[in-house]
């Protein structure tokens, strides 16, 4: 069975998210660890976390894929803002310990003109500080569309971060809209893209997928998500993904422009595409 879900609002707490996920046929989900555009984190609620952990186990969920705030730029130019972002990352990872065994994905960051090398060094430094050896969370770098000075739009850039951090437990999340936008043609050559990923990053690092269609044509570096089948990727691409031996076991998260009923329909659609 596919492990598939979508982004959910975290405002009502973790147990409520599990119940919402169940109501739309999901067996994983994503959520922002704090206000996606701000930096304020929810107050910690150990009881709610324990309840969520119990529900996840009871209903055999796959790993959740938490998402760091969009505003967290670990390689921003202002030293104070950069230190703040690093603190946010450390706090997020510490909090994830209340939901053990899950993933925490984030956008590596934008170097805003400081250059790729400097940006990678800042990102890696923050990760080395934040990733305590005993946290029961796997951190994932999200592959990006390469918009502006975004780092992570090339597999080589993800590799640079992995090398600079030097830990085996740092993974990658591939976002279908981002990588197609970034110049990896998963529509016409999914196998070729995966072998390129394996060569540069290593398939053992691939832990999760974001499933999004794209509003823009191949290689446009724009990062505008579209509903499945309504963009330049098309349903055939998602059919190949959910049946691909290297991908079908990974948690798949929808970040399409939908409310819950739309997400429920896309989850049903993906499950109906599964051939076995
Ligand atoms: Zn993302
Ligand atoms: Fe994404
Ligand atoms: Fe995106």
Image: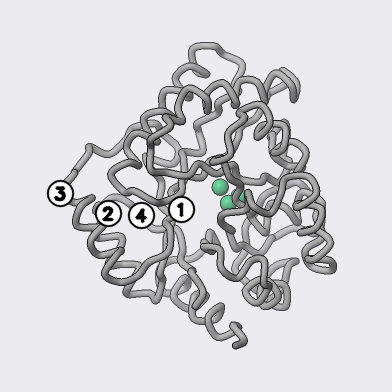
Looking at the image, is mark 4 or mark 3 earlier in the sequence? Answer: 4
Distance CA(mark 2)–CA(mark 1): 13 Å
Q: In the rendering, which numbered label is found on residue 14? A: 2
Q: Which residue is mark 3?
A: 47
Q: Which residue is mark 1?
A: 65
Distance CA(mark 2)–CA(mark 4): 9 Å
Crowd tier of the residue under label 3, counting other residues whose Cα lies within 10 Å: few below 14, some 14–19, many 20 or above: few
Label 3's element? Answer: helix
Label 2's element? Answer: helix
Q: Which residue is mark 4?
A: 9
Q: How is the image coloured?
A: one colour
Distance CA(mark 1)–CA(mark 3): 21 Å
Looking at the image, is mark 4 or mark 1 earlier in the sequence? Answer: 4
CB atoms of marks 1 and 3 within 8 Å:
no
CB atoms of marks 4 and 3 within 8 Å:
no
Left or right of residue 24: residue 180: right
Q: Position of residue 209 (x, y in %)?
A: 59, 58
């Amino acid at each position: 069975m596919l492990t598939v879900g979508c982004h959910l609002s975290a405002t009502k707490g973790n147990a409520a998210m599990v119940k919402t996920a169940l109501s739309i046929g999901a067996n994983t989900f994503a959520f922002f660890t704090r206000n996606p555009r701000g930096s304020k984190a929810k107050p910690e609620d150990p009881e709610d976390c324990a309840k969520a952990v119990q529900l996840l186990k009871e209903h055999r969920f796959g790993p959740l894929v938490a998402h760091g705030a969009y505003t967290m730029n670990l390689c921003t130019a202002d030293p104070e803002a950069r230190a703040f972002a690093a603190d946010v990352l450390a706090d997020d990872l510490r909090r994830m310990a209340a939901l053990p065994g899950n993933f925490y994905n984030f956008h590596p960051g934008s170097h805003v003109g400081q250059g790729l090398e400097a940006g990678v060094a800042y990102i890696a430094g923050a990760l080395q500080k934040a990733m305590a050896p005993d946290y029961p969370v796997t951190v994932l770098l999200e592959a990006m569309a390469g918009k502006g000075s975004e780092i992570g739009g090339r597999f080589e850039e993800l590799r640079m971060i992995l090398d600079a951090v030097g830990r085996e437990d740092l993974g990658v999340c591939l976002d279908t809209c981002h990588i197609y936008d970034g110049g990896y043609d998963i529509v016409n050559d999914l196998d070729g893209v995966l072998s390129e990923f394996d060569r540069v990053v290593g398939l053992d690092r691939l832990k999760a997928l974001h499933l999004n269609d794209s509003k823009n044509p191949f290689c446009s570096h724009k990062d505008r998500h579209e509903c499945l089948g309504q963009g330049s990727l098309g349903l055939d691409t998602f059919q190949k993904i959910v049946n691909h031996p290297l991908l079908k076991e990974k948690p798949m998260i929808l970040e399409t422009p939908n409310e819950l009923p739309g997400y429920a329909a896309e989850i049903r659609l993906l499950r109906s595409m599964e051939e076995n």
